[in-house]
């Protein structure tokens, strides 16, 4: 019995003092905001037809947050979070940003840099391999905008790195309705995306909705708020079809946050698992519009009103629960995900479409404005099919980041991840609160990651051309993410 008591005491002391040592890592915070609004005119992405923007209705920006902990005056761990008003961020562009940062800050561990997109459909084209048939003259070229983006973002990261100083953090949680499920199920077993609900055959919304608003608040050593993180499971595509540059509802969120917390506060936008969600209302729109019009607000202003109100509610509750000494752990790995296989039927249909589109464009080059991107989209499926003839078990290596910051976990993925997967991760996570960040990078084509139900139902976001990774890979992503998160909580 005496031996048992001694062993218990030893274990208690080890756990107590080990945890105390880790919990005393001092938090350092750096932040910066930089403008990435392009020179006009510029081609904007997010629709199948070519759109040349002649005006910028709002600026588009990058928000940089550097988090670092120090133990005995040495860096214990760090995370550099970069939120971008973009539709997507190609993985090769992230490599270019990291390489440029390395030139500026040789000692930085650039593998800890994370870039994520807010998924606004009114931001410049970034894919350098011919996403659209863009005129060669009279508009900003993709390569030129990419160079500008790399320069601006690397400068922003350097600025945030150089101004990091001791500070504190609090985490909050609240609710706001910003996104709605856009996958519509019908009685014949099919699904539509953003399709009609006012039909006799309408059955239900296919998947989940996530109205959580996850927040982080950061203060400097003097107690001045310097940055916030707002996690919302809704893409910023309320004004998605415009021929303009526009940050969508995040611009209005930032304006609302400035009024509430001051002009100097850096607002970092994290898009949660929202591949099947949209800010567009699927039903009861008339009632919602009436309330909005009585408030004299646009749709983006109304979404922002809800989000800012929820942030204020969280802030009021957590502002005195600040942590300046805590545990920060950041793990990153390349996760091999099994690719979704292209069937012979998929190949035949894609080949027929591409052949017909090529003929139409050859007969009338102007047809490329509406056909070119759809053709390239399906050409990528043909390329996948060809590769799969020699590699029967193809995989895609996705960069995965999992972070513990005190009681919260943060995890990333490169996809338009359907909301069910985000809920699976959060449900199984041992963290008090779990932030899911999608579109932290993006494969060239096929960024949607649909569920089993969605694949059965069909429609745009679940067809083979939209989906490099299918439900099998989605579950691998969930399982490994949860494993890494829960490894932080032995």
Image (tube, helix red, strand yellow):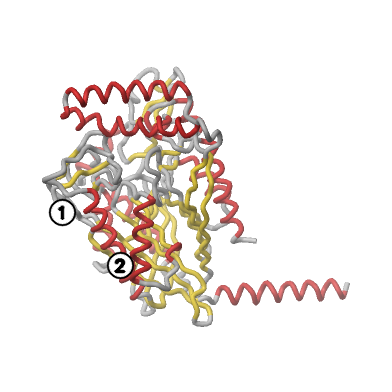
Residue depicted at x 40% and y 41%:
447
Q: Secondary structure at mark 1?
A: loop
For this view, does 109 lie left or right of residue 128?
A: right
What x and y, as percent, mark residue 437? 43, 52
What x and y, as percent, mark residue 269? 35, 55
For disc 2, the marked residue is 32
Q: Residue furthest front?
A: 390
What x and y, as percent, mark residue 393? 56, 36
Tell me the mark number nearer the camera, choosing from 1 and 2.
1
For this view, does 374 lie left or right of residue 317?
A: left
Q: 350 or 307, which is in the foreground? A: 350
Q: Relative to residue 300, is residue 111 depicted above or below?
A: below
Residue 39's label in the rendered image is 1
For this view, does 479 lie left or right of residue 27?
A: right
For this view, does 389 lie left or right of residue 52?
A: right
Quadrant of the rendered image containing residue 115: bottom left
Does any portion of residue 226 appear in the rendered image?
no
Q: Are marks 1 and 2 in contact (CB under 8 Å)?
A: no
Q: Secondary structure at mark 2?
A: strand
Mark 2 nearby-residue class (10 Å; few <14, some 14–19, many ≥20): many
Does any portion of residue 216 appear in the rendered image?
yes
Mark 1 nearby-residue class (10 Å; few <14, some 14–19, many ≥20): some
């Amino acid at each position: 019995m005496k031996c048992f008591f001694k062993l218990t005491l030893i274990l208690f002391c080890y756990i107590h003092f080990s945890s105390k040592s880790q919990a005393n890592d001092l938090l350092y915070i750096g932040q910066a905001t930089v403008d990435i609004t392009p020179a006009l005119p510029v081609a904007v992405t997010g629709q199948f037809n070519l759109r040349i923007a002649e005006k910028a209705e709002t600026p588009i920006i990058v928000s940089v947050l550097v988090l670092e902990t120090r133990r005995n005056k040495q860096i214990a761990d760090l995370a550099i979070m970069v939120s971008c008003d973009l539709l997507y961020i190609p993985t090769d562009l992230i490599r270019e940003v990291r390489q440029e940062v390395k030139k500026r800050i040789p000692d930085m561990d650039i593998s800890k840099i994370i870039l994520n997109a807010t998924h606004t459909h009114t931001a410049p084209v970034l894919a350098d391999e011919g996403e659209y048939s863009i005129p060669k003259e009279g508009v900003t070229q993709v390569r030129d905008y990419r160079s500008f983006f790399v320069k601006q973002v690397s400068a922003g990261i350097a600025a945030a790195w150089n101004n990091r100083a001791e500070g504190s953090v609090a985490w909050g949680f609240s609710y706001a309705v910003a996104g709605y499920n856009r996958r519509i199920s019908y009685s014949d077993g099919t699904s539509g995306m953003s399709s009609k609900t006012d039909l006799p055959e309408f059955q239900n919304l296919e998947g989940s909705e996530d109205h959580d608003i996850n927040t982080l608040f950061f203060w400097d050593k003097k107690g001045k708020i310097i940055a916030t993180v707002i996690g919302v499971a809704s893409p910023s595509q309320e004004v998605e079809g415009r021929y303009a540059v526009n940050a969508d509802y995040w611009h209005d969120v930032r304006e609302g946050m400035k009024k509430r917390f001051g002009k100097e506060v850096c607002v970092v936008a994290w898009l949660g698992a929202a591949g099947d969600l949209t800010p567009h209302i699927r039903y009861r729109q008339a009632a919602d519009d009436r309330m909005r019009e009585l408030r004299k607000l646009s749709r983006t202003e109304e979404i922002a009103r809800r989000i800012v109100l929820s942030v204020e509610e969280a802030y009021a509750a957590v502002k005195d629960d600040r942590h300046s000494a805590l545990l920060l752990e950041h793990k990153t790995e390349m996760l091999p995900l099994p690719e979704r296989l292209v069937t012979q039927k998929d190949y035949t249909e894609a080949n027929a479409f591409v052949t017909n589109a090529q003929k139409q464009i050859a007969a009338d080059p102007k047809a490329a404005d509406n056909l070119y991107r759809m053709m390239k989209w399906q050409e990528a499926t043909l390329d996948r099919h060809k590769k799969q003839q020699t590699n029967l078990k193809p995989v895609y290596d996705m960069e995965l980041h999992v972070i513990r910051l005190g009681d919260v976990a943060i995890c990333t993925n490169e996809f338009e991840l359907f909301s069910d997967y985000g809920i699976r991760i959060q449900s199984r996570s041992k963290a008090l609160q779990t932030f899911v960040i999608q579109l932290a990078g993006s494969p060239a084509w096929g960024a949607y990651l649909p569920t089993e139900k969605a694949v059965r139902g069909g429609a745009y976001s679940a067809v083979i051309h939209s989906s490099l990774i299918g439900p099998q890979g989605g579950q691998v992503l969930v399982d490994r993410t949860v494993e890494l998160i829960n490894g932080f909580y032995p």
